[in-house]
Amino acid sequence: MLVILSAGIAPGLALLSYFYLRDQYEYEPILSVFKAFLFGAFLTFPIMFIQHVLTTEHVFQGHVFNAFINIALLEEFFKWFILFFAVYQHEDFNEPYDGIVYGASVSLGFATVENILYLLADGVGTAFGRALLPVSSHALFGVIMGYYLGKAKFSTNKKIKRTLFFSFIVPLLLHGFYDYILLAKTKWIYYMIPFMLFLWWLALKKVKQAHILSKKHHEKNIFKNRNSTIDTIG
């Protein structure tokens, strides 16, 4: 059991640490990140229950509906809901890059519990494959979702709604394509490798863009504080 728990937790912890330590200005409070992780972990059970009911009752037929609705829509909607209503307005979310940290936290909370449950069912021999695919893909979906949420929070009013829409629809589509490749099964590895390389490229690109947005945000605050000090002295 200890081996399974270690194998189930380690990939998520490693990925979360990686994106957490990429923050260039101010690390998020560990407690806030842990709470976001727990939110994602608690989501696992209601989501898996709903998915089980939908699958048992044959509500959605075919790989497309199962991939994009039964799996991607349910999982990404609940993660987005938690991020928007429990994290987005929090005072610790004070720069664009923070969206990536909290997005990865919620997604990896979900992925870690899901990973442990699958390892309990399938055995520790599947741990390496699950770390490379399901756990890392969830992390990357969370990074992309968090990037757009961070951008939305510090955007002008005209761009907020559009960016919030992207924060949901982009991870949803990527997640749907990921699961469709797996469900189709026929030579899935030939499609999955380039897809995962693209996903990593896109997520790391969003990390870089978030760093630029955070830099501009901090420079703007410095300029504002400097003007405020001058006005006070004057």
Image (cartoon, rainbow, N blue to C red):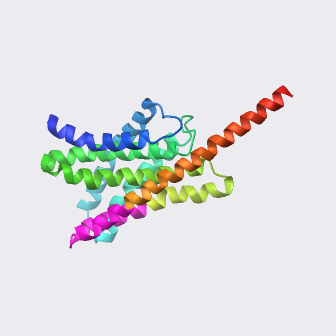
Query: Which is more toward the observer, 103 or 42?
Result: 103
Residue at figure coordinates x 36%, y 59% from the top left: 72
Residue at figure coordinates x 81%, y 31% from the top left: 230
Query: Residue 47, can we see it?
Result: yes
Q: Is residue 112 left or right of residue 148?
A: left
Residue 194 in the magenta stretch? The answer is yes
Position of residue 193 measured from the top left corner of the image (x, y, whole percent): 28, 65
Residue at figure coordinates x 45%, y 33% from the top left: 32
Image quarter of the C terminus: top right
Query: Which is more toward the observer, 143 or 83?
Result: 143
Position of residue 69 measured from the top left corner of the image (x, y, whole percent): 37, 63
In the rendered image, which quarter is residue 58 located in?
bottom left
Residue 97 in the magenta stretch? The answer is no
Query: Which is more toward the observer, 15 or 79?
Result: 15
Image quarter of the N terminus: top left
Position of residue 137 measured from the top left corner of the image (x, y, whole percent): 33, 55
Magenta extent = 172-198
Up-down: is 74 above or below 220?
Answer: below
Q: Is residue 147 left or right of residue 173?
A: right
Task: Point out the residue furthest to the top here.
Answer: 233
Up-down: is 193 above or below 209?
Answer: below
Q: Is residue 6 left or right of residue 177?
A: left
Position of residue 173 measured from the top left corner of the image (x, y, whole percent): 42, 64
Most common secondary structure along the magenta stretch:
helix
Residue at figure coordinates x 26%, y 53% from the top left: 132
Up-down: is 131 above or below 21?
Answer: below
In the rendered image, which quarter is residue 2 located in?
top left
Query: Residue 69, can we see it?
Result: no
